Image (cartoon, rainbow, N blue to C red):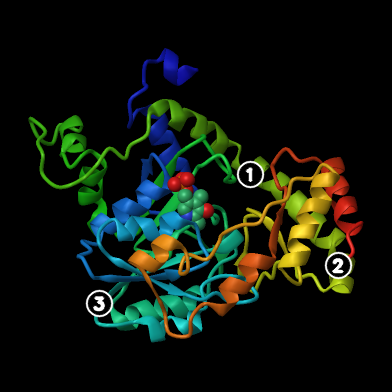
Amino acid sequence: MEAVRGRATRGDGPFTRRASDLLGKITGASQVLLTTSCTHALEMSAILLDLQAGDEVIMPSFTFMSTANAYALRGAVPVFVDCRPDTLNVDERMIEAAITDRTRAVVVVHYAGIACAMKEIDELCERYGLALIEDNAHGLGGFYRDRPLGSFGRMAAQSFHETKNVQCGEGGALLLNDVGLASRAEIIREKGTDRSRFFRGQVDKYRWVDIGSSYLPSDVLAAQLTSQLEDFDAIQLRRHAGWSAYHEGLAEWSASNGVLRPVVPDGCEHPAHLYYLLLPDLGNRQEFIRHLAARGVQAAFHYQPLHSAPAGLRFGRVAPGGCPVTEEIADRLVRLPLFADLDEAGVARVIDAVQAYEVI
Ligand SMILES: *Cc1c(COP(=O)(O)O)cnc(C)c1O
């Protein structure tokens, strides 16, 4: 309301600054640019990398389509690598075989906010001179070896879509850890103009200076985001309570039914973004979702592999070794409801409904 009353409704107003500062504190990013979505932040990263048609960008097949789409839009070729069966993150041992003369970048996604093997991936990127980008849509507030997720890549993209831990309906941010990218990033975000410099009084008129688009969100959305970020610790506490209750409450049931729970490797602190189970097969997964729905519990599957999706086949290619793990786990995965306002009784009801299912 304050944003509307203050007529600060266009972008880059006081709430945009406040939200950006709060995000900088959580992620340690040297510069934060709020965007209209994570998809748009990824598109900005593709422009900033100066990708040319035929350049290759390595990424997991098990991710949201925006991860690939942002680079395909620039004419680059997404190269899809399989995931690890434990964390469902890109399998770091399979990245090197995917590198060619055309490879320019590696995009990691920390699935469920559980970090990828950043030490190995970072070293590989250094060795081959590749840009590391984090699609950190799940990872806000997570850590890898005491370092915040979002601080590893040259750039990282955040999402504030309604389904994320911190949200303003639709929104995102581009985090820059390479300050050399800052002035161009600001131009790309402002329709290819130097309007940000103009507003700071650094130039006397603003002009068209580069390609770009309209990637900045209204300050009204930034106000909603600010209030969420100010509540961040409380939101996280409640999400962790739900996550841990599932994890403990379903330990026995999952062991006796051949169901796998999330694996959190040593050194990873996750932000309780989602809680998932891996059923033994597709038949059980579908039956399990029906079983829960009949008990009033909405559970959902998640990403379908990108390497075999129609646009994945058209614009991308699959890395050597294929993506057999991705194909399998995409059929077996179920997400349980996890919201900040899910109370203890709600979690207990879900656990009861889950435990009433017997794997066939
Ligand atoms: C949600 C999500 C996105 C897209 O976020 P938007 O803000 O809706 O554009 C991209 N990548 C991943 C991994 C996501 O989970």
Residue type for callout 3: Arg
Between marks 1 and 3, how big is the CA–CA gap?
Answer: 42 Å
Residue at the location (76% across, 41% down)? 342
Q: Percent from the top left, x then y, of residue 117? A: 52, 75
Q: Which residue is mark 3?
A: 102
Position of residue 193 in the picture relative to residue 284 (left or right): left
The secondary element bearing badge 2 is classed as loop
Q: Is mark 2 within 8 Å of ligand 1?
A: no
Q: Which residue is mark 1?
A: 233
The secondary element bearing badge 1 is classed as helix
Mark with earlier residue (2, 1): 1
Residue at the location (59% across, 45% down)? 165
Q: Which residue is mark 2?
A: 359
The secondary element bearing badge 3 is classed as loop
- Residue at the extreme top of the image, as rendered: 5
Q: Percent from the top left, x then y, of residue 204? A: 7, 30
Q: Nearer the viewer, residue 105 or 181?
A: 105
Position of residue 81 in the picture relative to residue 187 (left or right): right
Position of residue 123 in the picture relative to residue 64 (left or right): left
Q: Nearer the viewer, residue 195 or 23?
A: 195
Q: Percent from the top left, x then y, of residue 163? A: 58, 44
Circle 3 Cα neighbour tier, 10 Å, few/some/many (<14 / 14–19 / ≥20): some
Residue type for callout 1: Asp
Q: Quadrant of the C terminus?
A: bottom right
Mark with earlier residue (3, 2): 3
Q: Is residue 28 above or below residue 278?
A: above
Residue at the location (47% across, 28% down)? 223
Between marks 2 and 1, how big is the CA–CA gap?
Answer: 37 Å
Mark with earlier residue (1, 3): 3
Viewer-side label of 3, 2: 2
Viewer-side label of 1, 3: 3
